[in-house]
Amino acid sequence: MALFRKRAAGRPGEWYYCLEHGTVEEGPQCPAKNRLGPYPSRQEAENAMNTAARRNQSWENDPRWHDKGDDDGDDGGKGPSAV
């Protein structure tokens, strides 16, 4: 048994959105793999899922991130090993 419990790093005033619980937390309380942030305010953390959706939509529509001639990224199920 460990003598010292490792705590998540963070500062008061940093807000996170926990993906597992669907809650906002001040300072990191859940593991990093389960949270988005840090955000500078509680309100921004509450809107984390909307912010992520907006950014994903922007990325999906950005022509810089798509190969030329690849409309939807679907390779017909052939994958990289198909020749």
Image: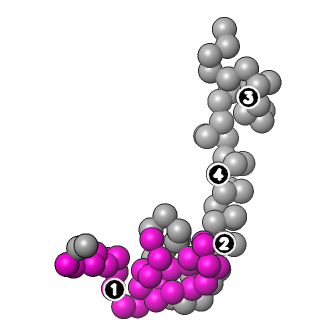
Q: In the image, what residue type sits under mark 4?
A: Trp
Q: Are the two marked residues, 3 and 4, in contact with CB atoms closer than 8 angstroms?
A: no
- Residue 70: which disc? 3
At label 2, the amino acid type is: Met
Q: Earlier in the sequence, mark 3 or mark 1?
A: 1
- CA distance separating discs 2 and 1: 22 Å
Q: Is residue 32 left or right of residue 63?
A: left
Mark 3: which amino acid? Asp
Q: Earlier in the sequence, mark 2 or mark 4?
A: 2
Q: Nearer the viewer, residue 76 or 30?
A: 30
Q: Is residue 50 magenta?
A: no
The reply to whether discs 2 and 4 touch (Cβ–Cβ < 8 Å) is: no
Q: Quadrant of residue 7?
A: bottom left
Q: Which residue is mark 4?
A: 59
Q: Which of these two is toward me, 27 or 50?
A: 27
Question: How many angstroms separate mark 3 from mark 4 (CA)?
Answer: 15 Å
Q: Secondary structure at mark 2?
A: helix
Name the amino acid type tagged 1. Arg
Which residue position is annotated with label 2? Answer: 49
Q: CA distance from mark 1 to mark 4?
A: 30 Å
56 is higher (above) or lower (below) than 23: above
List the residue tagged with mark 1.
11
Q: Which residues are magenta?
A: 3-31
Query: Which numbered disc, 2 or 3, marks the residue that appears first in the sequence?
Result: 2
Residue at image point 23% right, 73% down: 2
Q: Position of residue 33 (x, y in %)?
A: 49, 64
Q: Does label 2 or label 1 sit earlier along the sequence?
A: 1
Snapshot quadrant of residue 4:
bottom left
